[in-house]
């Protein structure tokens, strides 16, 4: 069987990796339009050896998807390269939001739920207890903001959910589907009438066994919160690339697909250099990009794929001399109602030691990129905006030793209301048309690194 994997991000690399395990004697090719694999995961060292992460930087080990990634890491013999953040560390416990000109620590333990902490007007436990008696609303889907406001009140929606969505997908909680992050809780409400009742029934139900591995056991024993690698998160895609290449996967960089034709049970796939015939295509590129490639023969499929739009994010890495963060933590997020051009700031050097210096990452734009940056023409403008806000919010007076600005264009798909239905329609079309096409990647069933790796395995 001859197959082609389209896209060399972590999703495409993982798809090729799992294909080599399932169909080891097949001819597998991978095309990547850029000069490197790894996609948005990029760990770059500056001249002083400081790591600048230009997108994703840590992985969560818990959940089925997290356990699957740990198994993959073990298979790749990368266990000794892991650098964990433990649950009792400041970086794990101290997560903040910037509201009304001040930084506020979010509740981080069961005890803190019973205390009134700013900016909340009452202890969070009050909102959770009230949820039990809130009437349910029978609907198919709704914005995650509306769901949280209905079930827990406006403060939880404004100060917990909205900044969280900014941090995860740079999106607007008032547009993102509840299924993006809280699908299970939404289904509890629809099935049992309340989230609380659903959680009780779930606790009594038989639990799904997570795949066992020594690394998973070590994670639980040592109580990891999140983790990365000593040389940055790009360690993972680099190793997958090396392994699949050693297994015979034909890697073609700087190879951009320009058109896809479906000829009965095979495909004719064009790039800027030549044309190939394949039995099956695994597309891991953004749905918007795939839509253009299939538009001529399958305009209806193209229209469905175009519904899943992505946003631009600006990343500004800042490196300062010495230790400047007075209250160590993971970082802070900014709720949209603050009307600031930054989404949040990650305290990289509080998470992982950076030679005694301070390293910060400022996230900007996302859903609001055009609103704030439509007239920007150079990196210096993004740098100045980021630095001004960091200095003001964190009371930093020093200038950075170095910095890097990265504009990630169309980097995070937005799972807006109706996303699940769109995915079902896409899958239904592919199935009925009997297309030799499989879809994977962040456009469909999860934007996180763990999500796309597990999706690749399942595919």
Image (cartoon, rainbow, N blue to C red):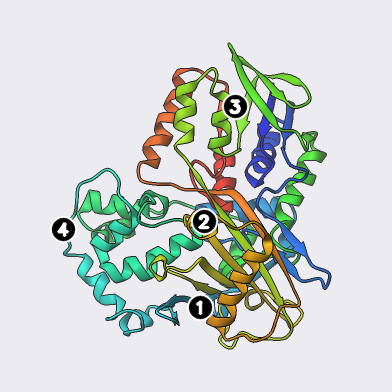
Q: Local crowd at mark 2 within 10 Å, few (<14), some, or many (≥20)?
A: some
From the viewer's perspective, is 290 left or right of 34? left
Q: Nearer the viewer, residue 452 or 374?
A: 374
Where residue 407 appears, x then y in whole percent?
Answer: 64, 55
Q: CA distance from mark 3 to mark 2?
A: 26 Å
Q: Badges 3 and 2: C-beta atoms under 8 Å apart? A: no
Residue at which label 1 appears: 93
Q: CA distance from mark 1 to mark 4?
A: 33 Å
Identity of the residue drawn at 16% across and 64% down: 133
Q: CA distance from mark 2 to mark 4?
A: 37 Å
Residue at which label 3 appears: 293
Where residue 374 appears, x then y in whole percent?
Answer: 54, 54
Labelled disc at residue 135: 4
Identity of the residue drawn at 33% across and 65% down: 157
Identity of the residue drawn at 67% across and 45% down: 9
Q: Badges 1 and 4: C-beta atoms under 8 Å apart? A: no
- Look at the picture and state if 148 lies above or below 2: below
């Amino acid at each position: 069987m001859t197959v082609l994997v389209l896209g060399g991000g972590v999703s495409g690399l993982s798809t090729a990796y799992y294909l080599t395990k399932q169909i080891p004697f097949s001819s597998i090719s991978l095309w990547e339009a850029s000069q490197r694999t790894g996609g948005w995961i990029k760990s770059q060292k500056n001249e002083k050896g400081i790591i600048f992460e230009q997108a994703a930087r840590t992985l969560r080990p818990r959940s089925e998807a997290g356990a699957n990634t740990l198994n993959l890491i073990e298979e790749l013999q990368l266990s000794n390269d892991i650098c964990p953040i433990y649950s009792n560390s400041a970086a794990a416990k101290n997560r903040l939001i910037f509201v009304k000109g001040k930084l506020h620590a979010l509740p981080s333990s069961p005890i803190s739920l019973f205390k009134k902490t700013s900016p909340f007007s009452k202890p969070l436990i009050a909102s959770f207890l009230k949820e039990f008696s809130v009437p349910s609303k029978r609907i198919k889907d709704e914005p995650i903001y509306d769901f949280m406001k209905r079930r827990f009140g406006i403060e939880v929606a404004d100060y917990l959910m909205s900044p969280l969505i900014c941090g995860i997908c740079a999106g607007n909680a008032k547009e993102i589907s509840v299924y993006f992050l809280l699908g299970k809780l939404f289904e509890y409400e629809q099935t049992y009438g309340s989230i609380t009742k659903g959680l009780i029934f779930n606790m009594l139900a038989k639990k799904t066994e997570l795949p066992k591995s020594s690394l998973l056991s070590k994670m639980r024993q040592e109580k990891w919160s999140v983790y990365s690698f000593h040389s940055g998160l790009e360690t993972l895609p680099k190793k997958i690339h090396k392994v699949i290449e050693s297994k015979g996967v034909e890697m073609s960089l700087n190879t951009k697909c320009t058109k896809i034709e479906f000829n009965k049970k095979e495909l004719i796939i064009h790039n800027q250099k030549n044309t190939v015939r394949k039995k099956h295509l695994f597309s891991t590129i953004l749905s918007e990009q795939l839509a253009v490639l299939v538009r001529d023969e399958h305009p209806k499929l193209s229209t469905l794929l175009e519904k899943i739009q992505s946003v631009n994010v600006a990343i500004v890495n800042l490196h300062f001399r010495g230790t400047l963060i007075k209250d160590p933590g993971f970082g802070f997020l900014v709720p949209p109602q603050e009307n600031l051009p930054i989404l949040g700031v990650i305290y990289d050097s509080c998470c992982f030691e950076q030679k005694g210096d301070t390293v910060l990452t400022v996230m900007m734009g996302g859903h609001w990129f055009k609103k704030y940056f439509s007239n920007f023409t150079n990196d210096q403008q993004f740098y100045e905006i980021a630095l001004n806000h960091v200095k003001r919010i964190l009371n930093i007076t020093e200038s950075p030793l170095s910095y890097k600005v990265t504009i990630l264009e169309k980097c995070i798909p937005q799972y807006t209301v109706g996303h699940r239905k769109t995915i079902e329609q896409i899958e239904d079309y592919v199935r009925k048309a009997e297309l030799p096409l499989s879809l994977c990647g962040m456009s469909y069933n999860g934007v996180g690194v763990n999500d796309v790796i597990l999706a690749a395995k399942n595919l």
